[in-house]
Amino acid sequence: METNLQLERPLHIEELLAALQSMQGRRAPGINAVLQVSISLNKVEISVGESKFFICTALGDPVRLEWFDPRGERVAAALNTEASRSRLVLYNAAVEDAGVYRCLATDAQGRSQEATVVLEVYQKLTFRDVRSPQEFRYGERAEVVCDVISSPVPVVVWYHQEQEITEDHRRRFQVLANNNLQIHRVTNADEGVYRCEASVEARGEIDFVDIAVVVNVPPVLSAPQQMFNATADYQESITLTCITAGSPRPVLTWHRKGQQLELSERYLLHDADGGRSTLTIRHIGQSDGGAYSCKAANKAGSQEKELFLKVFVQPVISQLRNVTAVEGGVAVVTCVAEGEPRPHISWRRSSDGQAFTDGDKSRDGRLEVRGLHGSSSLTISGVRRADRGRFHCEALSRIGGHQRSLFLDVEYMPQFLTNQTIFYSWEGNAVNLSCAVASNPLAAMLWRRGGLTIATTEGPNAAGGPNARVYSSEGRSLLEVTPLSDRDFGRYNCTARNNIGMRYQEFILAQADVPSSPYSVRLSAVSQRLATVNFMKPDSHGGVPISHYLLQYKEPSTNHWREVRSHSAAHMTVVLTGLEPNTTYEVRVSAVNGKGPGASSATQSFQTLPIREPSPPAVHGQRDVGVAYRLGLVKQDDGGMPIVEYIVKYKTTKEERWMTRLVPGAQDAALLQPLRWNTRYEVEITARNVKGLSEPAFYQFFMPQEPHITAESLFSSLGLGPAVGLGLGGLLLFLLLLDVSCFFLRRCGLLMCVTRSLRSQKSSTNQGKETEEGKAAYLKLPLKEENGKESLKPDSIEVKVHGENSHHSKTDCSKA
């Protein structure tokens, strides 16, 4: 670095100071020396940051040396080494420190003298806080900062890719007044290293700095699919995908409801090459529906993309409770259902199956349905007991349905179910007064008499006395009273109470009497030994139900009444049996209840019929097995005496001669056989008892065509298995007969082969005997008629087989 500052030699100054001091020491008294001030340097040039010191020397008895800066302010930092010398030190000089510094000397008389020094401070080339790399957003106006200082002001030149940026590049590049490089709409092509070079021609000073320029591209997001559908509670999984690009490579994250999603059992996150990121949602439920967002961020910015998952949820009825209402009041039952899409809710009444939907009303206007946002309310006005029961709520959507039911319970005050309030009894006869009540909730029941309560316990009590007992069960109370005197008859009160209300019913225990007499007694169906008695029930049963009727009958010549009891009180007909024919009888009827028999009716007389011949028998018939026919004989009026026998005569319609068969009277059928096929028969049947014969009864029947059994019909009736078995059996029988025929006629066949084998094992002495035994044999076959009967011709056919010595043609066994 060059400088124009010329410094005097220090030796001359020192010598001068020494001479002055010696002169001052030899000065005459009373004579003052003249002040002289000098500074070691007159003009100094330094760079910013350097340090420098100056020495001020005064001659002539100074008493004070002071330094003043260019602004005229006293410099407190002056360092006084001795009375005639002072040193000023400047550390780390700054541009502001430049200027004229004065050194002022003052003697005892107040006279002063000063010297000056000029300080010039210059700035070296300096790059201040130049960052590298410098990053910019894609497409923006970038300003590459090169902060360089010097004095005088430096000249800055920019280079890119070893080429100077000149005026030709001004369309995209521009060097600003502050020496920064401006790039219009920076792109990725502008990335690289830029050189900022500064120079000061006056000092020949030059320096540079390299700056890396990085262009950051904001993220760009895309989603192949933005809408997704899934069904909840089916263990489904679904994958959402986002693709991003940018520089530097963006970081992609997934968010839901403002919260970043992390890897878990339900959320699987995966980043693949090419900027692809996926979010897999496992075991999708209803709460997983809604918006999801993928967010990509880098230094240049961020971008967010929203994806929507629509979760279809099968309808589920989440709220349905049983309801209790009071008769006559209002009942509101509510059904709340959840699901996606929102389900449609309907109601169905279990009692009659009637269905109701939103806005429906029943015919009587008491039932109405209103729905809103997945909730439906069924309102029942003027609740009746018939409304009690189950109501079904059904939630239905296009992906399914759900049904639940509730029970509507109707509470009501007690209602008596007993219609009978008057009971009859007599002294010593226990009677049960039954009090039945319908109520909801169950009613508490008690008996009263004369204002006193009869305790609900078995055994004697104060109100009822020793002859009254109370037995209670659910909805029923039974008061057992055994009247002992007239005071036990009268009024009894049954009271029923629940939290809805109270009611009571009055019962009367009255004294019973025997029934009045039956009337309109008449006889019907009178025969030799039977008579039917009919009558009308009495006008009064005496307060106690009639248990039965008692019929008395006798012959007029005797006073002994015989009795017949009816089966029940409902039967007002009694049949008298075992009567004598042609006999007069008297009959009367009385009714019997728990207290006893009542008065008898007026006596009626009748006479049984005399003995006579039987009535004509009744006949029905049916075919029997084969050529037989069975006639069924129906028992008829026997005329008062048992049937001895039936005389059955029958013939064909084309014949004149009758065939007769006697059938004992104890039998109920007659079997006619043998008969002819395809023939019509006439039958005449007469019954006989000891009195004589009945009128004949006539009957006709027809015997059909004779059935023909064919192989086809036989096999079709037997079925496949038996038919095959019969076929195989027939084949074996045919082969056996053929083999026997071959053995006897042609000396061949399987039997012949066996015989020869056996003969070969016998001794020759037995040959004559074998010949003798084999000379003759007989085969008997029965002859059949065309209709399947055996013929009356000779039973068998004899087939004579000659012995071995006879002439016969030898036939090979294999040809049998």
Image (cartoon, grey):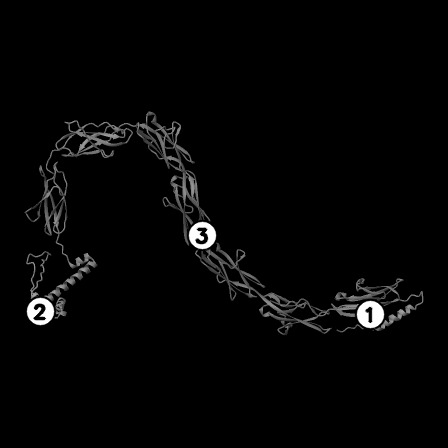
Looking at the rendering, which quadrant does residue 98 occupy? Answer: bottom right
Residue type at numbered disc 1: Ser
Depth check, mark 3 against mark 2: the one in front is 2
Depth check, mark 1 against mark 3: the one in front is 1
> Label 3, on which residue?
339
Give the image location of residue 86, x and y in percent: 83, 66
Residue type at numbered disc 2: Thr
Q: Indicate which disc, 3 or 2, sits on the residue closer to the N terminus.
A: 3
In the rendered view, would you say 29 is above or below 688?
below
> Label 2, on which residue?
765
Depth check, mark 2 against mark 1: the one in front is 2
> Label 1, on which residue?
40
Please report contact status of discs 3 and 2: CB closer than 8 Å, yes or no: no
Name the side, left or right, on which 48 lies relative to 82: left
Q: Residue at x 36, y 32 (%)?
A: 458
In the rendered view, would you say 740 is above or below 789?
below
Looking at the rendering, which quadrant does residue 420 occupy? Answer: top left
Q: Residue at x 12, y 32 (%)?
A: 582
Residue 115 visible in the displayed image? yes
